[in-house]
Amino acid sequence: MKMTKKLVLVAAVLPLMFGATTAYAYGGIDKGDHKGMHGKCGGFDKKVMRQLDLTDAQKTELKEMREANRAEMKAKRVGNKADRVAQMKAHHEKVQALVLADNFDEAAANDLASEMVGKQTERRVVMLKKQHEMMSVLTAEQKTQLKEIQQERMTKCADKMEKRMNKNK
């Protein structure tokens, strides 16, 4: 076989091998539940809200907060799209320069990583602030009930994860 044919064959087979490896890593068939505990273990979703017996005023206030947050996020996405694209491009260029350089510059990598962590931290703080504002609508009894519901869900989720881990052994 000529070298060109071998390279083409390797180029075709290699992605299939990585795909199969990924499928095995996730337990074979994609069941759409690779999110782990996200949203199902201790979250604040519609099921939890129904269990808390919110008043109409609380429901209205929470709905207004969600709509305001949604409008704010939409405005951010639309408003400064050119700036975001420029920032993403600049970040990508920094990463490419770092990765493709002849010698690895650890100081530049640390600076870039610190910058990324800083942005992530800012986003997390904003998210936590919004969650706090939403939780401030609840009464003390509802907050206690919420903690109990979340703890119960976490326990169920941990049991479920443990069963999966034992099943996959």
Image (cartoon, helix red, strand yellow):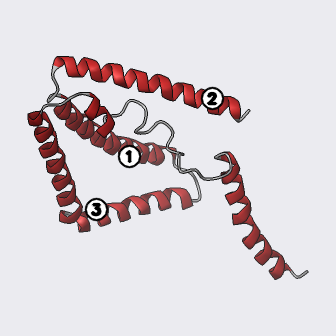
Q: Compared with residue 84, is residue 63 higher up or lower down, i.e. above or below?
A: above
Residue 163's disc is: 2
**Which residue is tagged 1?**
116
Residue occupying the far left of the picture = 57
Marks 1 and 2 close (CB-CB < 8 Å): no
Residue 105's x, y, as percent?
Answer: 52, 49
Which numbered disc, 2 or 3, marks the residue that appears first in the sequence?
A: 3
Name the side, left or right, on which 98 lies relative to 86.
right
Residue type indicated by callout 2:
Lys
- Closest to the observer, 129 or 68: 68
Residue at left offset 14%, top offset 49%: 68
Whole-angstrom CA distance, mark 1 to mark 2, is: 36 Å
Q: Compared with residue 38, is residue 15 higher up or lower down, i.e. above or below?
A: below
Name the side, left or right, on which 131 lies relative to 15.
left
Name the side, left or right, on which 102 lies relative to 137.
right
Residue type indicated by callout 3:
Arg
- Closest to the observer, 10 or 109: 10
Residue type indicated by callout 1:
Met
Tell us which disc is closer to us: 1 or 2.
Answer: 2
Marks 1 and 3 close (CB-CB < 8 Å): no
Residue at left offset 47%, top offset 47%: 109
Which numbered disc, 1 or 2, marks the residue that appears first in the sequence?
A: 1
For residue 60, which quarter of the picture?
top left
Q: Compared with residue 19, is residue 115 higher up or lower down, i.e. above or below?
A: above
Residue 81's x, y, as percent?
Answer: 24, 66
